[in-house]
Image (cartoon, coloured by chain):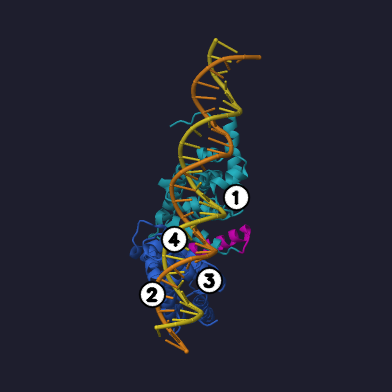
Chain colours: A cyan, B blue, C orange, D yellow
Amino acid sequence: MSTPPLRKDAAQNRHRIIETARRYVDDGKSLQLNDVARTASIGVATVYRHFPTPEALLETVALPTIEKLLRRAEHSLAEDDPWTALREFLAAAIETMLTDPAVPPVFAAATDALEVTGDCKRRLATAFAELLARAHAAGVIDPGITESDMIPLMCGVAYAANIQSTLDPTERATLGLRYLDLLLTGLHRP
Amino acid sequence: MSTPPLRKDAAQNRHRIIETARRYVDDGKSLQLNDVARTASIGVATVYRHFPTPEALLETVALPTIEKLLRRAEHSLAEDDPWTALREFLAAAIETMLTDPAVPPVFAAATDALEVTGDCKRRLATAFAELLARAHAAGVIDPGITESDMIPLMCGVAYAANIQSTLDPTERATLGLRYLDLLLTGLHRP
DNA sequence: CCTTGAAACGGATGACTCATCCGTTTGTGG
DNA sequence: CCACAAACGGATGAGTCATCCGTTTCAAGG
């Protein structure tokens, strides 16, 4: 279960691969391992050894961003007003999904299938559940809404904003926040 | 610009291809033309001649469903109350997207890129624009919302419902309508 | 500094998918 | 019945994918 310490050259290669993959993701290119290998001037087998599938590589690329969101979520837990806390976190989530193209596919995938980010995603879900529970307790949100509604809905909002492929990422993020507002208006109980 | 009448055997093959593709779509399989050809016991080249790309085949599969939705839209135009009319149409759209897996990718694609359904989709957009304009005129909807917001938002709602891959299509449709309601609550001005 | 074994490397390769080309067959109007 | 255009279909070359295995590199112990 423990990770044996990585050899120096291996660590470096791994790093190069992730860097290259990050560039691919940002450019909207699909992660083809053979292709990434060639670009990074690294043997194909090496890439496959580090990342058995494109999904695993994508997860690894997305991990730092998701961890950052997790910290933001934990920060939101400190906020007093339950509605503000929830709203703040959801806005952060949307912004994250629209800013980093590596994130949406990871969020949309079933958590169980995630080798790398599964744990992080579960902790995110826990934090979110807590925020939602508080909102419910305070009666400021539609009582019929559950966590397993909210996550897909968030992905849906991000998806909607992402369809506007002509817009640049910043504009898309703004649009996403606007769409989130619409949704939240529908959910808010004053 | 006109379609020269199709030879009898050609028409039959075309029909067989579409039928097979429909089964693929319903089973959630991706449309690989070579594969469809083998399943339909038709030469690969024949399939490619009728449908140069998987997208074209998918569009053709989706066309009847989209045409049906168009008729529903025109029917909604006859409804007096602008809010009811809009709502009715949007519900029909969501239901369509969640019932027929061929539709969402077609709706999400840029209309200009659609050889087969482009025209149909444009007429749908026109009808929808009319419904939206009436709602705006009556002041029953968020004045900031435009057609180019609504279409992605609809796709987003459908996407959200579709993420629940464990549910069967009927349940997903119900869920989608619920999500639509949330969104509409956010948009409605009483 | 040298040895040695484990760890990591990388590219050649076979399996697989894709889409086109072209020789053959089939339908149809005269 | 003929002739020709229309349509057919499978063989094939281009391209992608992921594995295998012979070679190289690292680092711990002498």
The residue located at (61%, 64%) in the rendering is: A166
Query: Residue tagged by mark 2?
Result: B12
Q: Amino acid at mark 4?
A: Asn
Q: Is residue A48 magenta?
A: no
Chain letter for mark 1: A
* Nearer-N-terminus badge (3/4): 4
Query: Residue tagged by mark 1?
Result: A24
The reply to whether dot 3 and dot 1 touch (C-beta < 8 Å) is no
* Nearer-N-terminus badge (3/2): 2
Q: Amino acid at mark 3?
A: Leu
Q: CA distance from mark 1 to mark 4?
A: 29 Å
Residue B143, visible in the rendered structure: yes
Image height of A16 relative to A130, above or below? above
Chain letter for mark 4: B
Chain letter for mark 2: B
Q: Which mark is residue B34?
A: 4
User: Of discs 3 and 1, which sits in the foreground?
Assistant: 3
